[in-house]
Image: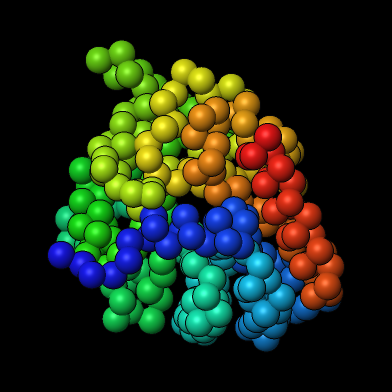
Amino acid sequence: MSTVTPFGTRLREAMDTRGPLCVGIDPHAALLAQWGLADDIAGLETFSRTVVEALADQVAVFKPQAAFFERFGSRGVAVLERTVADARAAGTLVLMDAKRGDIGSTMAAYASAFLDPASPLFSDALTVSPYLGYGSLKPAVDLARESGAGLFVLALTSNPEGAEVQRAVREDGRTIGATMLAHLATENAGAEPMGSFGAVVGATLGDLSSFDLDINGPLLAPGIGAQGATAADLPAVFGKAVRNVVPNVSRGVLQHGPDTAALRASAAAFADEVRAAVSA
């Protein structure tokens, strides 16, 4: 049995003390150019270091998008390792956005890469895809429990293509998305103050009252800012589960770089808006 404080407990504390905001670290080529940086290792490193140094003391979670680092090969992964280490050293939780999903020993290897404390990419939580069947995630679930880490399972994503899978109806009349939420509720049963197994649920999806989002775990909500959703939309979308929502903002904050003060001001404004909406 792990003696490490579970991710859900650590996340609840971070959200209550720093505010609920999750800021992406998404160094895609267009954003690097907007910052006046080259699309190379030096630009990648400057971008990532600037985001962490500017925001590590005022956001609950950083969410590095692994693909934007992996595109540079081993040198890019080395930058990702340093980014994760720097963020965690500063006391910010790290959610690795890698969306891994496979079966058996391969899923176990993915889990080890991001959820084993001995790994240089060890993160507080990992996004995973359950669409080889929820049971295929068992190696990640087991290792997350052991290491005190968390998972965020793709359940109701904001991309329009997701609906053809996630809203497909099973023989029992329940949608695939609802099935994933039910699995997560089971994982989190009895956890206090919040379970460690979360769902990814798009903030742009509108009325989700037909889904039971009260999974006793965190709900990562992409779509705030550049994708069109606002903090004021959260109560209508998430209902009574809104207190467990972790709004993810990437471009909405990052577009204000590389000026450190502007990054901080933007993140603070989003956090204030979320606090006001959630507590209303």
Q: Please indicate, yes or no, whether residue 159 appears anywhere in the rendered image.
A: no
Percent of width and height locating residue 214: 42, 32
Is residue 93 positioned above or below 279 on the image?
A: below
**Image position of 164 (left or right of 171):** right
Query: Residue 239 versus residue 154: which sits nearer the camera?
Result: 239
Taking the image as shown, residue 56 lies to the left or right of residue 264, namely left
Residue 239 visible in the picture:
yes
Q: Residue at x 68, y 71 (%)?
A: 55
The quadrant the C terminus occupies is top right
| Spot occupied by residue 23 in the image (x, y as percentages of width and height) | 63, 60
Task: Check the image and report above or below for 226 versus 168.
Answer: below
Q: Is residue 163 above or below residue 84?
A: above
Q: How is the image coloured?
A: rainbow
Residue nearest the observer in this picture, 200 or 265: 265
Residue at image point 28% right, 61% down: 144
- Residue displayed at 38% across by 81% down: 120
**How far across and how far down the image is residue 69, in percent?**
55, 72
Residue 41 lies left or right of residue 123; in this view the side is: right
Pick whichever, 178 or 235, lies toward us.
235
Total numbered badges shown on the rendered structure:
0
Q: Quadrant of the N terminus?
A: bottom left
Closer to the camera in the image, 271 or 107: 271
Q: Quadrant of residue 114?
A: bottom left
The residue drawn where x is 44% and y is 31% is 213
Answer left or right for 39 relative to 89: right
188, above or below 112, in the image? above
